[in-house]
Structures are given as C-alpha cells and as structure tokens.
Image (tube, helix red, strand yellow):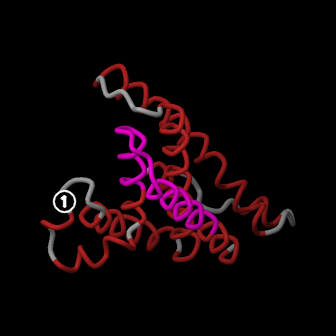
Amino acid sequence: MRRMLLTPLQSRPIVGGLGALRGVLASYWPGLLIAVCQVVVMYLVVHFGVGLHAKYPIATVGFLTLVAGTFLALIQMFNAVFGVAVGRVVTLAFLMLQLVSAGGIYPVETTAKPFQIIHPYDPMTYAVNGLRQLTVGGVDSRLWIAVAVLAALLAASLALSSWAA
C-alpha cells in the first residue's frame, strides 16, 4: 500500500532529460527507503515483541529487503504501465491472488485447483519459501532459487517501468 501513496513516476526527472531508467529509479528510491525502514521495524517487533528468533537474522533482513524492493518495483510497474487508477486495482487483485496461491496462509494443497496451478508462478511463493528457510534453518537450493526469481522480477519490473516512462 505504501507505493500507492507515492508517485509511481515523477515527471520532473524524465522531463529534465535524465532518461527513463534514471527517472524510474528517482521515483523508486523514496519508496525503497520507506520499505527498508519498515523491514527493520518489522524484524525488531517480530524478534523482540513476538519472540521469533530467525536462524539467520542478517540474511533474513537482507532477504526481506529484497522482497520489499521487488514488490515495490512490481507495484510501480503496474502503476506506470496501466496508469495509477487501473494500476491500483491491478495491484490489489494481484495481492489477493498471491495471498491465496502462495501457500503462506494455508497449505497450497488445501486450496482450489486454479490456485494450485498458479502457485509455482506466484512471486510470493518464493518470498514465503525463502523466509521459511532463513527463519527456521535448513537452507538449500530453494533459497537461492527464491533470490534469483525475486531479483529477476525486480529487474524486469524496473525495465517495464522504464519502457512505460
């Protein structure tokens, strides 16, 4: 939701001739700074308030930052490509679809067949898999696949936002 309150593409850097990617990044950085602050606050609350101690705390914070940055770029891309009004609707619909199909709330096997089909293509699936491994331990290739998928989605989202700019 935080990205919906910020301008997805600031016109000043683009009009000033900075180029599309630099214009997108100029719009992306303020949201990313807020997201990093939210990651730190959330981790501290979960660690000290809830008592959940991650097996790999620094890696967990780093992975959470990657997750936040990726989804921030994805929301920026939706708003840049579809326009802010439609982009907000697409973002909310995408969020609802991900929550059901990621397997983070309910085991994916207990959901309807369409959500089971979507599950391997859902970016949130990779966020859930990575966080499970970093908080509980037992890191294997699923973590590195999650990092690669989220990094690729981050790059693709920024590229599509640049194209839209």
x 52%, y 77%: residue: 82
Nearest the viewer among 163 and 142 is 142
**Count of residue discs:** 1
* Residue 115 vertical position relative to residue 16 in the rendered view, above or below: below
x 38%, y 69%: residue: 122
Nearest the viewer among 6 and 37 is 37
Of the residues shown, which amino acid type is indicated by label 1?
Answer: Pro
User: Mainly helix, strand or loop, the magenta region?
Assistant: helix
Image quarter where the C terminus lies is bottom right
x 27%, y 79%: residue: 117
- Which type of secondary structure does the marked residue at label 1 adopt? loop
Residue 55 x %, y % = 41, 32
x 32%, y 65%: residue: 98
Residue 70 x %, y % = 54, 57
Residue 65 x %, y % = 54, 44
Q: Quadrant of residue 101?
A: bottom left
* Residue 33 vertical position relative to residue 93 in the rendered view, above or below: above
97 with respect to 154 (left or right): left
**Is residue 138 located in the magenta-colored stretch of the structure?**
yes
* Residue 68 vertical position relative to residue 91 in the rendered view, above or below: above
**Is residue 139 located in the magenta-colored stretch of the structure?**
yes
Residue 48 x %, y % = 36, 19
Spot the residue most to the top: 48
User: Which range is magenta?
Assistant: 127-155
Spot the residue most to the right: 17
- Would you call the spot at circle 1 few (<14 residues within 10 Å), some (14-19), or many (20 or more)? few
41 with respect to 20 (left or right): left
Residue bearing the label numbered 1: 107
